Amino acid sequence: MQFSENLQLLRKKNNMTQEQLAEHLQVSRQAVSKWEAAQSYPEMEKLLEICNLFSCDLDLLVRGDVEKDMVEDTTQYDRFYNRYSFAVAGGVALIILGLSAFLWIEEGSETLAYLCFLPCLTVSLFLFVLFGIRKEYFEKQHPQVVDFYTDAQKQQFGQWFAIAIASAVTLLILGVLLMKFLELYVSEDRASAGFLLLVAAACWVFIYFGLQKEKYNVVGYNRRHQPDVSTAAQKEENICAVIMLAATAVFLAIGILSGSWSPAWVVFPIGGIACGIVSIVLKGRQ
């Protein structure tokens, strides 16, 4: 394929117009149009900017076949986001499992309960920090990724996503029923522990498949990392991180100081609602 064909294919694959590409490269739309019509050729500086924008090799852009290369995940994007999804979902589920163990064991030995909960919390925080840093580094290294997923792969995932979400909702309903059943035979705290056991499983499914759904939206990934959008997205991410850390701190403070672990978990949905409001406000200003 010629450079003109490669450029046009990359631009369309990343859902960009000629005007948007021209703006990124600081050239006129007519210049981009002439490049795609093979009527002129960009300077080396612009070629390198195009490579950086679309995360492709210079030799591939000028002399290669971009369409053929698109079927390959050259950045290991899929592998990284699979690990990231699993780690984040696992970290959240581990905290809830640790709390479930704490509530179940606390009646027998409060010390043993803390020895079960604190390692879970520590491992979860380790996973959040580790994969948060890795995600930031990966996205800086690969601000633009070629959409290599086929329509068949996306459709198949859509089917699994529907099944997963329905299963997670069912787990939450079963968790409520289990809690009501256990309240007849054990203490309220142990009944809550049984409920949280199924909540942990449901949360893992919600978070893992939610992140996987985001993974398949490569066009959205590329759009978020465009210069005019990435700053706002980073601001939103930072604010939400602070909100959820504050919610965790409040949860731990209430639980440790008063022992009211069961009602304290309400801070997490409140934090989630706050993050949603922040997202709506920031997007409304763009």
Image (cartoon, rainbow, N blue to C red):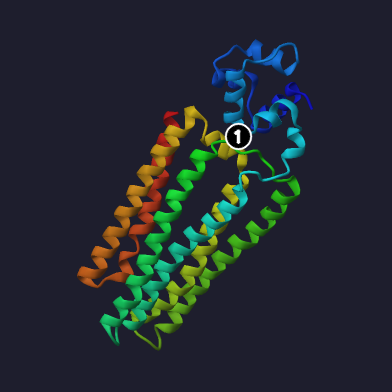
Image height check: is 239 above or below 123?
Answer: above
Image height check: is 37 above or below 206?
Answer: above
Badge 1 is on which residue? 55
Locate residue 192: give its quadrant. Answer: bottom left
Image coords of residue 70 (percent x, y): 72, 39
Image coords of residue 223 (percent x, y): 55, 34
- Residue that protrudes farthest toward the right in the picture: 1
Image coords of residue 166 (percent x, y): 60, 63
Q: Between 283 and 44, which is closer to the camera in this rendering?
A: 44
Image height check: is 173 above or below 188?
Answer: above
Residue drawn at the location 51% of the way across and 66% of the way down: 202
Image coords of residue 169 (percent x, y): 55, 64
Residue drawn at the location 57% of the way across and 47% of the way down: 214
Q: Secondary structure at mark 1?
A: loop
Name the amino acid, label 1: Ser
Which quarter of the image is occupied by the C terminus?
A: top left
Residue drawn at the location 72% of the way across and 18% of the way down: 36
Locate residue 234: give its quadrant. Answer: top left
- Crowding at mark 1 (Cα within 10 Å: few <14, some 14-19, many 20+): some
Question: How many numbered discs, if any?
Answer: 1
Q: Is residue 90 left or right of residue 186?
A: right
Which quarter of the image is occupied by the N terminus?
A: top right
Q: Is residue 43 left or right of residue 247?
A: right
Q: Between 16 and 281, which is closer to the camera in this rendering?
A: 16
Residue drawn at the location 24% of the way across and 69% of the way down: 256
Q: Is residue 110 left or right of residue 37?
A: left
